[in-house]
Amino acid sequence: MSSTLYNAVRLCAVLITLIAVLCARYIPERELMLHPNGGMVHSIYADSDWGGTSTAEWVNQEDVEWLCEYRESETHGGCGYSISFGLPAGEGLDFSAYRGFKLNLTYEGDASRIRVFIRNFNPAYSKEADQNSSKFMSLMLRTQDLHGDVFIDFNELTVIDWWLTQFDLPRRLAGTEFDNVVTIGIDYVTPGTHKLRINKIEMVGEWLEREDLFFAIIILWMCLLAWEGIGRFYTLNKKSQAETQRLTELASSYHKLEIEKHEYEVKSTTDTLTGILNRGGMEQFIFELLEKNRTRDNIGLLVIDVDHFKRINDRRGHDAGDRILQGLTAVVSLNTRDKDVFGRWGGEEFLLVCTDINAEYLRLLADKLRGAVAAYRFEAHNPLSVSISIGATMFSSSDTFTTAFKRADDALYRAKDSGRNCVIYLPTPNSTD
């Protein structure tokens, strides 16, 4: 390739780099409006509910305006407000991609400070039946600062001491968490009469982190240099082939090595028992798929597990178990599309990756596979009923393979707990599926 082409490409790369660096600060922020938003649940509470003397009442519930009479008593509490998201117990919203949130409040009263708090549910220590087990993170705000929008950075929030003392968590779990927020709220720490109106609660973050942008620029330049180097090498190699027979022979030998390498790669990524992709082959395919489809559009994932497979091995022997896995592979392959990629993840567990599919069809496909396996006659000479459990999910734009697999694997465990021979689908965060 000519030096003119290389120079032109370099110039384009320089321009792209300059534009990216200079315009990074002007990239719009990621925003999520929690209020006003008709889908949210607003609540107020007072310690009178558990024996105290404080009261809370709506002044205008539609405008989220309420009045608190906070009276000192032996009961811990007071009164406060919270917004939740109308989700089942233990399920919240993932705010880990945001930097913090904006508040716009109208306060009337004598308090010098109010407390803003967030509760995050983590199954490692939180219980659905105990609302207090959700991690309590808070920040004190001066009421004199409540003019217009007030931005609260997540880094300003700390886990409150009484909560850490009560639940005695190890240090690795004691920090702030925002990946499954179930409640955002405001309460009072000063006795008196307080009137508060919630005008706005809005999550704020960045669509593209500066680090990711600069990393992409580095990758761009690495690819450019690699492309230029490969191009120049190719040119020199072509000239050398025309000049000497020795290089022709070397090129021929290189070609044979490439064929052998390809054959080895095929063998190394193929499961010897079933003839489909093994774990390494599936990881390679999924990595390439996600690299090509950065937005993760219409990609579904099924985790399939043979029910009571150990019992089959114990009663029928491992040879029968191997035949069951081979038969399962045949049934699934017959009932899926050519572009669906099926692989053995390990033991009796399989993965099916589906492209160009939506959540509804993914669930239908999963149930079709479950029914096909249940109806198939395994071990014809000594019939054996075999069933499978399936965990299903769709990739979201923010998912890595690890996060999507964990969601599908969690769904599989729920299917096992639900009696097996069933399909459980877990939607992506913020999904309406």
Image (cartoon, rainbow, N blue to C red):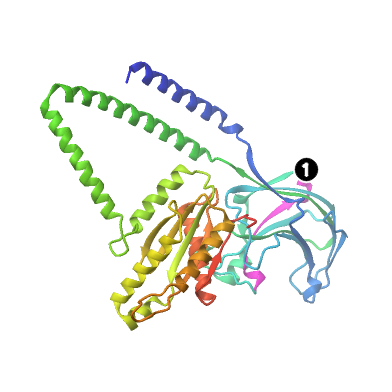
Q: Nearer the viewer, residue 300 or 396?
A: 300
Residue drawn at (54%, 58%), measured in percent from left and top?
Answer: 362
Residue position for label 1: 148
235 sits to left or right of 135: left
- In the image, residue 213 sits, relative to residue 191, either above or below, namely above
Q: Nearer the viewer, residue 198 or 218?
A: 218
Residue 267 seen: yes
96 sits to left or right of 245: right
Residue 177 seen: no
135 sits to left or right of 146: left
Q: Residue furthest bottom?
A: 315
Q: Position of residue 172 (x, y in %)?
A: 49, 62
Residue drawn at (78%, 43%), measured in percent from left and top?
Answer: 148
Write down the quadrant of residue 165 in the picture.
Answer: bottom right
**Which amino acid is tagged 1?**
Gly
Q: Residue furthest top?
A: 4
On whether residue 259 falls in the magenta region, the answer is no
Q: Which residues are magenta?
A: 130-148
98 sits to left or right of 210: right
The N terminus lies in which quarter of the figure? Answer: top left
Q: Position of residue 91 (x, y in %)?
A: 62, 64
Residue drawn at (26%, 23%), measured in percent from left and top?
Answer: 235
- In the image, residue 154 sits, relative to residue 19, either above or below, namely below
Label 1 residue SS: loop
Query: Label 1 crowding class (10 Å Cα cut-off): few <14, some 14-19, many 20+?
Result: few
Q: Position of residue 231 (x, y in %)?
A: 30, 26
Q: Residue furthest left?
A: 246
